Image (spheres, rainbow, N blue to C red):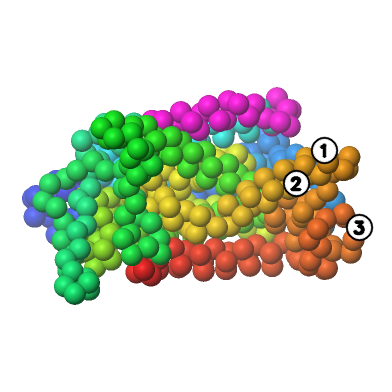
């Protein structure tokens, strides 16, 4: 709303009103405002949650200090969601199709997570919302995002074309017309655009239509996978919120360079008109995560619950798809994916060995992976991987995961030139 107010004032030559035309200025303001909302509103929300005795039910995992967390307020993801929404209402270009999609995704997954937490807390059902309903909602969002990308005339790109002399890239130019595309940026490859059409090229004349079916299915897979991976990562104080803030910074940079023809040309990536506005959303997202981290850092005063974890994961997945950087997610969200793979690997191996030997065996001492490092490697738990011998304290473990996340974020951004 402030964007439109100052846009009007700028037409009246009001001093300083033109600042709101700059994405970088609005991004900085969105981050600051979201952080302040999180800090000030978060305190009041925590008190209200405590009064209503909306506390987290702690599973018996035999971990050091776990019972001290019993009764800690949950559903704190509301802080993140409201911080993003209020910040974007003030500083975002609300008619921008990319911003509309991100706001819809935030509310959609926030509602899904809230329903899950509500059932756990108020209905006293530890299982929460049935898994099939979660999947249906996540698939539904993926379908909406995928079809919007296909049908919206505002979501277009200008594909990059290399001008080579003696097999050396001398310049990068862009086609004059905006086009719909199912191409995406692929890391570490010289010809850095991968078109999903290749997957259905065997269909011949029908490939152009069939590729969009494949694309929508891929969007659904990404939204569901990243959302659930973030949900699994949310098991230590500050781990999910801190990791998400790091990812948000990298996504903001990628969105900005993709929406600027000069930077896109330098990096030899496709130019996506209007996507630079997503940097404002990314900044609000980072500010919201950091504002929440103010209370979620060890020892946590509030947990985000599924209200927060499902939302932040979905936001990251949808954001990456919109800027055609979804193939960077295995690197950028490396912490999330390793956590998810540890669970998948553990369950699969346990079922396989139980069927083969009659007794299930484990790869890790406990999953998700962060709990493995909290268990002693003294052989008391029958697992293939016993290291580390001494349990790592929660604050140190979270800090190390953050450091890994920073390295992965830098690597993900650097892949744009590492070819």
**Crowdedness near tag 3: few (<14), some (14–19) or many (≥20) residues, C-alpha within 10 Å:** few
Give how far across and how far down residue 361 sits, in percent. Answer: 83, 48
- The outermost residue toward the left is 12
Quadrant of the image containing the N terminus = top left
**Crowdedness near tag 2: few (<14), some (14–19) or many (≥20) residues, C-alpha within 10 Å:** some
The answer for how far apart the CA atoms under marks 2 and 3 are is: 19 Å
139 in magenta: yes
Disc 1 target residue: 355
Foreground pick, 351 / 13: 351
Q: Are marks 1 and 2 in contact (CB under 8 Å)?
A: no
Q: Residue at x 64, y 26 (%)?
A: 130
Tell me the tag on residue 349.
Answer: 2
Of pointers 1 and 2, the one earlier in the residue sequence: 2
Which quarter of the figure has residue 293?
Answer: bottom right
Q: Nearer the viewer, mark 1 or mark 3?
A: 1
The answer for how far apart the CA atoms under marks 1 and 3 are is: 23 Å
315 vs 8, left or right, is right
84 in magenta: no
Give the structural element (helix, strand or loop) at label 3: loop
Give how far across and how far down residue 108 sits, in percent. Answer: 46, 32
397 vs 38, left or right, is right
Foreground pick, 354 / 123: 354
Relative to 93, say whether 295 is above or below. Answer: below
């Amino acid at each position: 709303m402030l964007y439109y107010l100052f846009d009007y004032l700028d037409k009246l030559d009001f001093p300083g009103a033109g600042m709101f035309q700059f994405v970088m200025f609005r991004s900085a303001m969105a981050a600051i405002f979201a952080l302040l909302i999180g800090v000030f509103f978060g305190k009041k929300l925590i008190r209200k949650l405590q009064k209503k005795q909306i506390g987290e039910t702690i599973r018996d995992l035999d971990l050091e200090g776990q019972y001290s967390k019993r009764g800690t307020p949950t559903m704190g993801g509301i802080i993140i969601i409201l911080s993003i929404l209020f910040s974007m209402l003030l500083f975002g270009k609300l008619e921008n199709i990319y911003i509309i999609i991100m706001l819809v995704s935030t509310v959609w997954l926030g509602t899904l997570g809230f329903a899950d937490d509500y059932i756990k807390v108020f209905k006293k059902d530890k299982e929460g919302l049935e898994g099939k309903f979660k999947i249906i909602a996540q698939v539904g969002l993926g379908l909406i995002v995928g079809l919007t990308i296909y049908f919206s005339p505002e979501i277009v790109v200008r594909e990059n074309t290399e001008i080579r002399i003696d097999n050396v890239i001398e310049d990068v130019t862009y086609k004059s017309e905006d086009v719909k595309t199912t191409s995406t940026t692929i890391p570490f490859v010289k010809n850095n655009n991968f078109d999903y059409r290749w997957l259905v090229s065997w269909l011949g004349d029908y490939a152009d239509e069939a590729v969009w079916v494949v694309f929508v299915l891929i969007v659904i897979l990404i939204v569901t996978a990243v959302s659930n991976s973030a949900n699994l990562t949310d098991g230590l104080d500050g781990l999910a919120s801190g990791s998400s803030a790091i990812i948000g910074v990298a996504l903001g940079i990628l969105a900005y360079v993709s929406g600027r023809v000069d930077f896109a040309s330098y990096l030899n990536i496709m130019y996506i008109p209007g996507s630079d506005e997503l940097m404002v959303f990314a900044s609000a997202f980072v500010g919201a995560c950091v504002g929440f981290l103010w209370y979620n850092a060890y020892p946590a005063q509030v947990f985000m619950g599924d209200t927060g974890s499902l939302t932040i994961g979905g936001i990251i997945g949808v954001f990456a798809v919109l800027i055609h950087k979804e193939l960077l997610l295995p690197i950028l969200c490396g912490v999330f994916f390793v956590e998810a793979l540890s669970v998948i690997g553990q369950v699969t191996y346990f079922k396989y060995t139980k069927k083969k030997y009659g007794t299930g065996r484990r790869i890790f001492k406990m999953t998700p992976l962060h709990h493995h490092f909290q268990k002693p490697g003294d052989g008391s738990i029958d697992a293939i991987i016993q290291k580390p011998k001494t349990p790592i304290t929660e604050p140190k473990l979270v800090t190390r995961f953050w450091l890994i996340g920073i390295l992965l974020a830098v690597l993900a951004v650097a892949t744009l030139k590492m070819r």
